[in-house]
Image: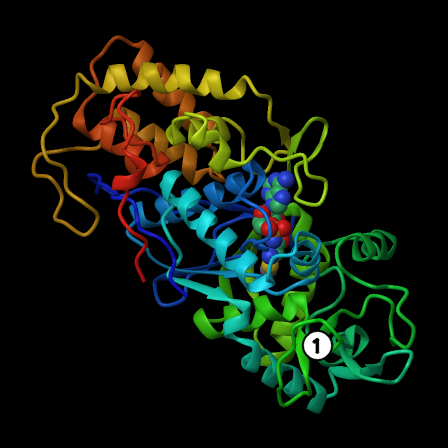
Amino acid sequence: MRSWTAPRVPSLPGAGTPPVLHDTATGSLRSPRLVEGTASLYVCGITPYDATHLGHASTYLAFDTLVRAWTDAGIDVAYAQNTTDVDDPLLERAAATGVDWRELAASQTDLFRSDMEHLAVIPPTHYVAVTDVVTDVARAVTHLLESGAAYRVPTPDGAVDDVYFDVRAAERDTSWHLGLESRLDLDAMTRFSAERGGDPSRAGKRDPLDPLLWRGAREGEPSWDSPVGEGRPGWHIECTVIAAQTLPAPISVNGGGSDLVFPHHEMSAAHGIALTGHRYADVFAHTGMVAYSGEKMSKSLGNLVKVSELVSGGADPRAIRLAVAAHHYRSDWEWFDDDLAAADDRLRRWTTWARAAAVTPVGVAGDSEPAGDLPSALLTRVRAALADDLDTPSALDAVDQAVASGAPATRVDVDAVDALLGVDLRRAVDDRPDPDSMSPLTD
Ligand code: 5CA
Ligand code: ZN
């Protein structure tokens, strides 16, 4: 599936340090392992039934910062992201609004692409829709049935079978165990399973926590003919299959919001080991939850601040990016409406400062280094902040201090803010790109 247009990323003198990241599975800071010099990243994508809100944006901006830091450290990055374009909440929204579910998914995915372009997010190498891998998921489910890691559960009327993953069999036959990734106790797992798409009380399961792998066809629901029978994929297996198809195992970093710690990433990891025999991911990284009006911002609650609405209301996307970067990616935080004005102030101060920099043509990543440039003190500070578990608040402080020092910006300073923080200071604040002149989405 097409992703979106990449922003221009200036190359910087010298090289950054690859970041250490907090790993949920060990509770410690770790340096993600690379495979043959390449860092691989899988980030769980949107379920496209409503527009990108600031919670999603903050998750994708955090991993964009990781991609930028890796690239600056001279590391090749392979990045995959899915879009859950067939799932219960999407189907429910489509039914409630009388829109075809495919059209709803396509239009919201398009809006997400344009939000990501506005926010200067580097696109994934592989952007994969679940509806494009249904047969591959069915084959994986067949494999799990054959190896004894999965079993069929008929619906109460016996009309169709669903297929479930057998967590106890996986614990017996692989190096995975419940809690390996989430480090939660059984009570918490059961609660989260019920709250986050699981069905611990479904009759006929071997264990309440066994997750759905394949949902047999129901009247009025989309379904595909497949080796495992007519139906559609369960949630966790979609990410396992897409990651296995696009990235080497183990993935260097498996990422998403902290609402995915359990069951989603625990079960993706279990499916991965059961399918490939390899550990699923080296580091499991999770972003904090963004709240609004006192509660987690979520499509199901409807307390959303949408990126597209902020932008169409006149917000400078760079200010949105700065407002998000003012929070550490791991903290839970609440969006307040005046956050944007504060970020806009900061952006104005920074662009005024940047005007002093020599505005000569800049190199882009892959070009040879601009001759004669050395890392500036600011670049060194920003690199050090990001190397320390993507500490964007400290990086913003470093820029604030450089701006306040009275010393003029150098070209390297301006490039550093652009390449590492995704904020291009060469454009004045009121110099908005004409939305109609934005480059078209490419394959
Ligand atoms: N399609 C699945 C993942 S396979 C999904 O969770 N979709 S989502 O649209 O609900 O969320 C997309 C991404 O945004 C996920 O990584 C999720 O963890 C993250 N996310 C959702 N809500 C918030 C929030 N309020 N704050 C921060 N991140 C969030
Ligand atoms: Zn996922």
**Which is more toward the observer, 418 or 388?**
418
Neighbours of disc 1 within 10 Å: few (<14), some (14-19), many (20+): many
Q: Which residue is mark 1?
A: 214
Q: Is residue 288 visible?
A: no
Q: Which residue sits at x=53%, y=20%?
A: 339
Q: In the shown orientation, is residue 320 left or right of residue 443?
A: right
**Which is more toward the observer, 373 or 434?**
434
Looking at the figure, which quarter contains the C terminus? bottom left
**Which is more toward the observer, 328 or 85?**
85
| Position of residue 93 measured from the top left corner of the image (x, y, whole percent) | 67, 54
Q: Which residue sits at x=10%, y=35%?
A: 361
Q: How is the image coloured?
A: rainbow
Q: Up-down: is 182 above or below 348?
A: below
* Type of amino acid under label 1: Trp
Q: Quadrant of residue 318?
A: top left
Q: How many marks?
A: 1
Q: Quadrant of residue 401?
A: top left
Q: Is residue 14 visible?
A: yes
**Which is more toward the observer, 8 or 417?**
8
Looking at the rendered structure, the secondary structure element under dot 1 is strand
| Position of residue 88 measured from the top left corner of the image (x, y, whole percent) | 70, 61
| Position of residue 265 measured from the top left corner of the image (x, y, whole percent) | 65, 60
Q: Up-down: is 271 above or below 181?
A: below
Q: In the shown orientation, is residue 217 left or right of residue 384?
A: right
Looking at the figure, which quarter contains the N terminus? bottom left
Q: Which residue sits at x=36%, y=53%?
A: 4
Q: Up-down: is 162 above or below 398?
A: below
Q: Which residue sits at x=36%, y=48%?
A: 122
Ligand 2's image quarter is bottom right
Q: In the shown orientation, is residue 377 left or right of residue 206?
A: left
